[in-house]
Image (cartoon, rainbow, N blue to C red):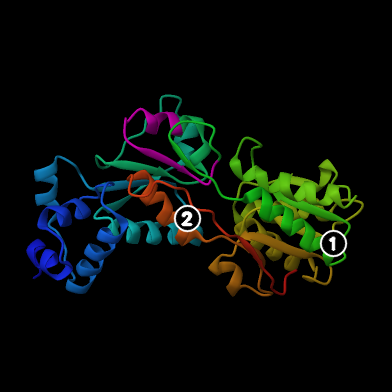
Amino acid sequence: MATIKDVAEYSGISIKTVSRVINGAPTVRPKVRAKVEEAIRALNYRPALAARQLASGRSFIVAMIAPRQTYSYFSRLMVAMAEACRDYGHHLVLEVIDRSEMDSDPAWTLQLSCEPDAVIIVPPYADDPRMVEAVAALGKPMLRMAVGDDGVGQALPVPSYEISYAMGRYLLAKGHRQLAIIAPPRKTMSAYARVEGFAQALADAGVDLPPSCIVAGTMDFASGEAAFRQLMSLPRRPTAIFATNDPMALGAMACALRLGFSVPQDVAIAGFDNSVEGQMCYPPLTSVHQPLEEIARAAVGLVLGVEQQRPEFIHHIVERESA
């Protein structure tokens, strides 16, 4: 089994500096860090967590605060964050918080299963004031993922407005003039920027998006079904629907099939996330691709202080048969 001395000899870096890299010290130069990380991978070196905790007084744990969801968006984030934590000498602990418990208990308090060095809050909790306040009270470095800079702790924004504007332009270019959107449940959510970007694209083209064509969902399959029923009962049915995440888009597609509508011949449907589920359904779902693995890695690096600059994330539309 490789030791820290082996890593130092392989990389040509001192044991002291190797130790600083392993412990996630932010002051190590990138070239030096890269040499040490290459040696760690080549030798399959695994530092003993208990020994590191005892020597440093730190846990080397990053907690990810997430909802009780099985949607692949969260599994992709979890895997990518776990890999990033490993590369930075840390472990990821998933803390699943049940929304129903928060909403039903006025005295709800955040109880974690560990004592993390840092905490990453993912949507939809990243802009939930109650959750953010509870995490801030821990006094640990905190990062809110996929939200704007307003608020406590670090934030890692993504270009939701810009790519949703592009989705509006995309559907307009397909000839659609009666469009609708399945929105997030609250205007205070950062994901509501997707509605604003989409609406602006239509407004710039002189196409109306009446309030009746903006139906709020709850970011899940069932609410996509319900929203589709509501939209298709309008006197002027939309010919294209943009759902602000893939589960709602898939719910809308399933409802279309049950009601006898053909996708995309009768109504085009597009989503947001480019999920595995959207690629496996029929017809395959047109969707916005988010570089979740890059976003997750950046979140870990920033909250640990290893990275100092927020990267720009490139989103793009993946065209498939549904739209």
- Whether residue 71 is visible, yes or no, is no
Tell me which corner region of the image, top left, top right, bottom left or bottom right, holds residue 120. Answer: top left
Residue 295 image label: 2
| Secondary structure of residue under mark 2 | helix
Work out whether 241 lies above or below 262. above
Which residue position holds label 1? 239
Q: Earlier in the sequence, mark 2 or mark 1?
A: 1
Residue 145 covered by magenta stretch: yes
Residue 251 rendering spot, x and y as whole percentages:
66, 60
Q: Nearer the viewer, residue 199 or 106?
A: 199
Which label sits in the foreground, 2 or 1? 2
Q: Which residues are magenta?
A: 132-147
Q: Amino acid at mark 2?
A: Ile
The spot of residue 87 in percent (x, y) is: 29, 60
Residue drawn 24% across and 65% down? 35
**Is 311 above or below relative to 100?**
below
Q: Which residue is at 74% across, 63% downward? A: 269
Quadrant where the N terminus sits is bottom left
Amino acid type of the residue that numbered disc 1 sits on in the rendered structure: Thr
Q: Nearer the viewer, residue 46 or 266?
A: 46
**What kind of element bears circle 1?**
loop
Residue 272 image point, x, y percent:
63, 58
